[in-house]
Each structure stands twice: as C-alpha cells, then as structure tokens.
Image (cartoon, grey):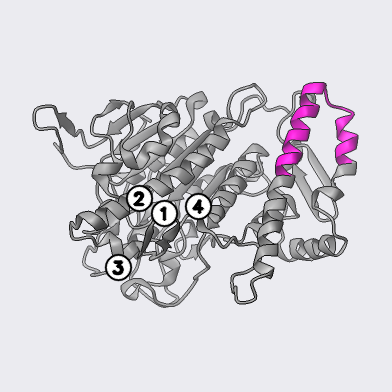
Amino acid sequence: MMRSPNFSRRSILRGLGVSLALPYMESLGSTLPKTIPLRMGFTYIPNGVIMDKWRPQKTGVLRELPNSLKPLQNLKDDLQVLSGLDHTKANANGDGAGDHARANATFLTGCQAKKTGGKDIRIGVSVDQIAAGVIGNHTKLPSLELSCDGVRRSGKCDSGYSCAYQYNLSWKTESMPMVPESNPRLVFERLFGQSNSFIDRQNQLKRNGLNKSILDFALEDAARLKKRLGKTDQGKLNEYLTSVRELEKRIERDENQRANLSDFKSPEGIPGNYKDHLRIMFDMMAIAYQSDSTRISSFLMAHDGSNRSFRDIGVPEGHHSLSHHRNDPNMIKKLARIDHFYSEQFAYFLEKLATTKEMDGSRLIDHCMIILGSGISDGNLHRHSDLPVLLAGGKSHGLQTGRHHDFSEGRYNEGTNKFTKNSVGVPMTNLHLGLLDKIGVRAKHMGDSTGMIVNI
C-alpha cells in the first residue's frame, strides 16, 4: 500500500520495517493541525439485546443507566442512547430466512443484500468506506477493520446467504468487503510496520530472529527526536512508546501461551480468552486513533448468529441459541448477562479514550464518535426496528452527549410505567449521513436514507 500523500505531516519513527506515527506534540509546531481531527468508529454486537434491560426508559438527560449498560455509568456524560432507528433492509422483503446475514450486511450500508451463496454477492458501500474515500488519504491507513472471528469470504452461511455478508461489516464496493483482521499481531504490524502484509511479516521474522522489539529499531530515531522536544513532550513521547511496548508484550505473551498448547489451532497472536481478545483489539483501535494512524475503524466483536458460549460469566450455552428465548426467564437472565459483558468491554475502550490526552489537553474521546450497536433488537423475533444504538464521544465537535434521544418520538408514561411508541422509526442510514457530515464528508444519500439526522 502506498503511503498517503498527506501522511508526511506527522512525525514518524523509522527502523527495520518500522513506520511508527507519533501523536501530535507542541514542540513540533510546524506539524500541528489547526484543529484536532474527528475520528469515526463502529462496533457491532451480535444477536440483539434484551431491550428492556438495555434501553433507558426515559428520554432526555442520562442519569441512572439500566442494568445491561451499568458498566458505562461513569461514562454516561460521554454517551448518547439513540432509539427509534430501523434497518428495514434487514427484513426479509420477500427473500425468506437469513436475518443474521442481513443484519450484518445492512448495519453500515442500509442496503438489501442479494440472496446468494455464490460469487455474485451485492450489497452497497458502507458508511465507513464512504468516509475513507474522502478523508482516508490524511492518515497512514485509510481505515482499520477488526474482528474477533475468523475470515469467511465465500461459502454459504445463514439460510443460503454468502458467508461474506455475515463476516464483514465494511464494504468498499457493492461486491467487495473490507475483510477484517482478527490476529492482533498482524494488526500491530500493520499499524507500526510498512502497511504491506508480506513485507511486515518478513520484517517481523527478522526482528524475532534478532530477538528484538519493533521499538528497538525505532529508538535511535526516537533519541534524535527527543532532543527537539520540550520537557512535556518528552514525557508524552515516553508514555506513548511505553504503551506501544506494553501492547507488543501482551501480544508476545499470548503467542507464547499458544505455542505451549500443542492442540491449539488458532493462528499465533490470537488470545485464547475472548475477553482478552476483545480488549487487545480495542487497544489497537485506541492507539490507532491516538497516533492518527487512521481516523476510521470498524470492529465486528462477533458475527450475527454467533453461538459463542460465555463460561467465564456463567453462561455455558451458545449466544444464538439463547437469543431464541421464547420468553423463558432463565434464558433472558443469561442473555442480559452477555449484554452486560459486552458493555463492560466497550466501557474499557471508552475509558482508554477518556484518559488519553490530546495536544490541547482535551481528551481523545472528545474527538471521537463511536457507535456501538446491532442490526437486531429482539433476537427472539429477529426484529430489525428500534435497534440498540449507542453513540459515544464527540463533545469537542458539537455532539450532544449525556442524553437518551428517541427518533420515533416515543413517550414514557409515568402512570403505566411503560414506554409507548407513537410513530414509526427512521432509517439508521439517516444517522450515518449525520455522522458523515460531522466528519466533513458531504453525502446526500446512502442506502435507504430519507434525510439526514443533524440533531446528534
């Protein structure tokens, strides 16, 4: 991959196969931007959620979050809960079964997936790739696609739909997915290497042969740079390099653990524990934003229809199997526990963004807008309306955080203690257009949009 033409304005440390972008530093006045850039991210939850334990009952100011969102309580002032958003193109619309494939495929595109298990897949360009096509040249990587699942580009999965729909969130064209990476080692090399997977892999092997870290080859360049920095920026540089090294050590530790398990079949670098895998991928996203290596990311925590079990939190049954709960209280309780687990991992990510400082002293989270959501609300009924959607961050760019906004104009009835819908929802693609507008990308239409949500 060729380096973007605007990437040279960032300070970079170089060494053997190393191209390490640094955060902005005041001492390097010539490289400072006039404004801190806004980043965009999308994180996907599979199989829907238990809505009455996930969604706040009242609209307006967020106060006490419901149980499934409790891990985010301390971050409520950085959140928006957005209700009343629909993905009608994930409905069958004459195509029969396949709601999980359609949920994934529609989430960032708002388009109806062509029902096929062959090569003639067709969906639409996703919101992240619309943004990458306009602003991706400002960073080393136009966009970053992550997953905790393996890669599936072909074959039949859900009810005759190609596996490409279910295992990809991001689409560069209507027939070309941006295949996500699940191996933290390869993501690390992509962020801090030369952005060519073959070259990065060869350089990694060379460094391993010399028993040296990726940073060992950048320290000489770092020492030269340090002489140009003020005391504050020297501390910032040390802190950043330490965070990169700690991330590398975690990957190495997981690789060593996998090497000691002769019957373990996963590729090297992938943690055996799902929570660890999620968190190290969130760390990758955070450091990619911090170094401005990319401003656009998507993270498929698990594909829709995933039947992963959660034994660590006392849920040995498969997630998808449980999602068809048929109103069984015990199954609902276990599903809510899974929802809580995913909120915990998202809170981990947001806390990292909230404790990372930008050049002007503001928080990194104030310059990010990160969606957490699913293409299914009620997994039992495969419902694609009134989706569970959170939008985090963006205070410094005018986003109205700390509230619950219902775009379908629902009302909470104090007398009946129930939330009543007064009208239909709006396409989630209207939100996508609003996010694009915030990040400086003007798009009049995408997918099934009917307008632009500007009140975000």
In the picture, the disc for residue 237 is: none
Percent x, y of residue 432 = 40, 42
The residue that mark 2 highlights is 337
Label 1 or label 4, whichever comes before in sequence order:
4
Are dots 2 and 3 in contact, CB under 8 Å?
A: no
Mark 3 residue type: Gly
Residue that label 3 marks: 98
Query: What type is the residue that disc 2 sits on?
Result: Arg
Instruction: Name the residue tied to disc 1.
Output: 313
Q: Is residue 237 magenta?
A: yes
Q: CA distance from mark 1 to mark 2?
A: 7 Å
Question: Which of the two discs, 2 and 3, labels the residue nearer the N terminus?
Answer: 3
Q: Is residue 156 left or right of residue 225?
A: left
Task: Identify the residue at horizontal 35%, vertical 45% (top origin).
Answer: 429
Segment colored magenta: 221-244
Mark 2 / mark 4, whichever is N-terminal? 4
Q: Nearer the viewer, mark 3 or mark 1?
A: 1
Label 2 environment density (alpha carbons within 10 Å; few <14, some 14–19, many ≥20): some
